Amino acid sequence: MSVDGEAFVVGIDREAVLRRRDIVRTVERRGAWVTLAIGAVGIVAALYVLIAFRGSGLWPFALLLILAMIPLVLSTLLAFRLQAERKRWYAANELQPVAMRMTPKGLELACDGAAYPVVLPWQSVRGFRQQKLLGQYALELDLPPGIGATTAGVRGLDQPAVRAVVKPNPFLRPTGLFLVKSLDQPVHIIDEALKHFSHGTAGVRR
């Protein structure tokens, strides 16, 4: 346990985070290319129907197929844009040694790729959900309905790197906020600390 006055601090295993970055980058790129291929095939097929069977009454279905495929193509562009932004940020910034800090006032999170920490008063956070993502256990931030970047006391949720993991685009594969094995505290200790500082309103759900 790392204690700083009235705070509980959870640190980061540097090597585990770097390995996680490689896994996330590889999975996202593969997923993006597969999604792009599906979208392209769908659009080409719809265009073929429009041209080959014009006048047959099939054009509404072809147009609907094109409209259905456009979000897939856009999600691919979004994935590549996020990767480019992360790469630039990684090159310009050192890996932060602290993952999260809990105090009586709230929870502070260092999201990988974000310029500054996320700050959440206890009334604006439920804690974390532990889920298996990309083959490994990760912690996802759990926020009550209606909590966003403009909520009183909340800071940092509007950063692109944070939005990508806290409220991911429905077409992007979720990656979680923290890899469990990259944290220097076990999940049950983090759960106890959350409950202590939030007076029982936040914790880790499994």
Image (cartoon, helix red, strand yellow):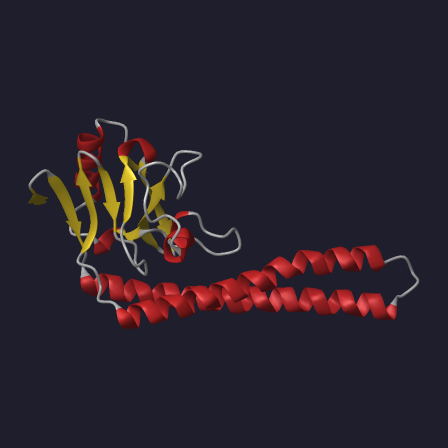
The answer to whether any part of residue 1 appears in the image is no
Rendered location of residue 168, percent (x, y): 45, 51
Q: Nearer the viewer, residue 63 or 119?
A: 119
The residue sitting at 25% across, 67% down in the picture is 93
The quadrant in which residue 73 appears is bottom right
Give the quadrant of the C terminus.
top left
* 57 over 190 or under it: above or below: below
The residue sitting at 20% across, 39% down in the picture is 188
* 183 over 92 or under it: above or below: above
Q: Nearer the viewer, residue 79 or 162?
A: 162
Give the quadrant of the N terminus.
top left
* 89 over 178 or under it: above or below: below
The quadrant in which residue 8 appears is top left
The answer to whether any part of residue 11 appears in the image is yes
The residue sitting at 31% across, 50% down in the picture is 137
Rendered location of residue 109, percent (x, y): 26, 48
**Residue ranking furthest to the right:** 55
Rendered location of residue 99, percent (x, y): 22, 52
72 relative to 184 in the view: left or right? right
